[in-house]
Image (spheres, coloured by chain):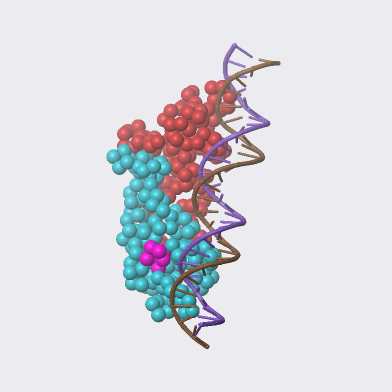
Chain colours: A red, B cyan, C brown, D purple
Amino acid sequence: MFSTSSKYAVKALLYIALNAAEGKRILAKDISGPMNIPKAYLSKLLQDLSKHNMVSSVRGPGGGFYLTEDNMKVPLIEIIQVIDGDSRLNSCLLSLTNCDAEKPCPLHDIVGDSKAHFVKNLQENCIGDLVDGIKEGRSVLPI
Amino acid sequence: MFSTSSKYAVKALLYIALNAAEGKRILAKDISGPMNIPKAYLSKLLQDLSKHNMVSSVRGPGGGFYLTEDNMKVPLIEIIQVIDGDSRLNSCLLSLTNCDAEKPCPLHDIVGDSKAHFVKNLQENCIGDLVDGIKEGRSVLPI
DNA sequence: CATATAAAGGATAAAAACATCTTTTAATAT
DNA sequence: ATATTAAAAGATGTTTTTATCCTTTATATG
């Protein structure tokens, strides 16, 4: 449903949120291990996220990644869009081009509502919300 | 959300359902054009679907593809699974391995219900249902 | 200032998805 | 029977996604 890259990105951001702060940064290699993400690939993803203000970083000794309050508030859908591109969740379910709302495709009929809810929830929630869920024991960050 | 290949497959099956019957078969090349699917690639997909009893075919002059009543009744989810493999819709939304229901991942919390609905609708509907929607004017088969 | 550290950036490689081409097999019509 | 048609099957090519490696830049510390 999401690309491997998007899953990596969200997992990494969650791990950073749970294990770092403005004062206490975390290294790419220390996310890579516990989250089971190839280190070099993760670095590229974090680079991308950093360019889009979805994660913060400092170089050099004592450096690493961390999340600001603002980083925490980025809607999940934007993270997915940065990594997977617009079309993955936006395009018509059946065609490669966009589905016209006036002329819905046959899958629109069947799963359009579920998809709309799915997307809406990704729009209305951010990394911070997921972190809350973990801290309150409602969910668990998987390996 | 679905792979390009899955979209091709569903579109092709719908086009066959609408334009062929036991007596009146349709050629791969006559689906390829109107549905905007590369002919050789479509042939491979139909071959796959044929092996799984999701489409019927006869070779030689006057041959081609058509759908039996049974072909029409295959749940959409099975078509997706044949083309994309099990994991695309089945795997955890966050991890690469499966999400434990006892320990839901943070995305489960947020979009689990929408995803479950989405999958359920794909389980409960078949090509025949989509065809009905088109014939009744509720939806339109896109190019 | 020199050195070490760690992210940023660029180049390259491997795997998967998408696509094409050629040969073979089955069915029909002449 | 023979020729023709069209799907099945196999081999190969291209593009995108995933992954690695090497160099450069920024920052901290002795």
Residue D1 higher or lower than B99, as above or below = below
Q: Position of residue C13 (x, y in %)?
A: 60, 42
Q: How many marks?
A: 0
Using the rendered view, name the quadrant where residue A11 is placed.
top left
**Residue at screen point 35% across, 36% down:** A140
Q: Is residue A53 visible?
A: no
Residues in magenta, as a range: B49-55
Q: Nearer the viewer, residue B8 or A27?
A: B8
Q: Quadrant of the C terminus of chain A?
A: top left
Q: Nearer the viewer, residue A46 or A135?
A: A46
Q: Position of residue C30 (x, y in %)?
A: 52, 88
Magenta span includes A67: no
Q: Position of residue B62 (x, y in %)?
A: 47, 79
Q: Nearer the viewer, residue B94 or B68?
A: B68
Q: Nearer the viewer, residue A79 or B68?
A: B68
**Residue at screen point 33% across, 58% down:** B123
Q: Position of residue D26 (x, y in %)?
A: 63, 27
Residue A50 higher or lower than A123, as above or below = above
Residue A65 higher or lower than B38, as above or below = above
Using the rendered view, name the quadrant where residue B118 is placed.
bottom left
**Residue at screen point 58% across, 24% down:** A60
Q: Is residue A138 visible?
A: yes
Residue B142 higher or lower than B92, as above or below = below
**Residue at screen point 43% across, 28% down:** A19
Q: Residue furthest left?
A: B102
